[in-house]
Amino acid sequence: MSAIHANLQDVRGRIAATEKAANRLESSVSLVAVSKFHPAAAVEEAITAGQHIFGENRVQEAAEKFPALRASPNEIELHLIGPLQTNKVREAVGLFDVIETVDRPKLAEALAAEMERAGRRPDLLIQVNTGEEPQKAGIPPTELEAFIELCREKLRLPVIGLMCIPPIDDEPAMHFGLLAEMARRHGLETLSMGMSADFETAIRLGATHVRVGSAVFGPRPVTTPS
């Protein structure tokens, strides 16, 4: 058994145990294996071990890595979990099944135009800057209601949920709780929150998707793709 296979077994076991402890339905939480900076061979190992949902931070890296992987009979669901520039929208809409980082009106408008042009509608999550950090992407909580209305009512975008990345020095539980409450208020069922260090806390607070990288693939390679 490869290290990645063993890691996946461990993470899946921890997810299942936390679901049970939190009185959640079995398999109610999806594991997004974050493969950024890891080679296609590592993704292939994960696929062999039964993993089919992957997260990538950059459109260019995903475009280089995943078309060949998707040529196999294995069904892959690919999430964009990093910032999306408007000049990459066409490529992102064609490549990803879920875009988790919708974070500003200009991007929402570009996504709507490209979906209309391409006839392809990946699911969207709105990234919320729960810590209101000036250097971090995401819609501030106070602006979320108006942004959801823009996305849903005016642009008719397929927004299915919310995503957050808590401030590194804060207790993540309060941010996960805030995101879950905002999702309930707006009738959004998908909550992408929690990473390698805190995904069990996120599950207890309602996560439907956890984004786990190092606990699955190990440390990032010393040399990362350009």
Image (spheres, grey):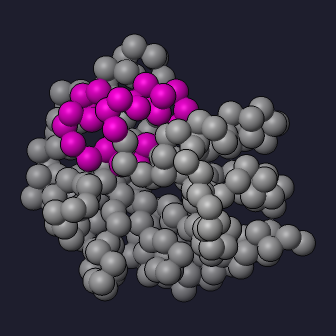
Q: Position of residue 119 (x, y in %)?
A: 46, 17
Res. 104 image quadrant: top left
Q: How many labels, in total?
A: 0
Q: Which residues are magenta?
A: 85-110
Give the quarter of the figure containing the N terminus.
Answer: bottom right
Q: Residue at x 39, y 76 (%)?
A: 205
Question: Can the viewer see residue 164?
Answer: yes
Q: Position of residue 188 (x, y in %)?
A: 33, 52
Q: Position of residue 73 (x, y in %)?
A: 82, 36
Query: What is the residue that sits farthest to the right in this orientation?
Result: 1
Query: What is the residue that sits farthest to the top in this orientation?
Result: 117
Question: Can the viewer see residue 156?
Answer: no
Q: Position of residue 149 (x, y in %)?
A: 17, 39
55 lies above or below 89: below
Q: State whether the magenta stretch is mostly helix, strand or loop.
A: helix
Q: Residue at x 55, y 32 (%)?
A: 95
In the shown orientation, is residue 117 left or right of residue 42?
A: left
213 drawn magenta: no
104 drawn magenta: yes
Res. 156 image quadrant: top left
Q: Residue at x 80, y 74 (%)?
A: 3
160 lies above or below 32: above
Q: Residue at x 32, y 32 (%)?
A: 86
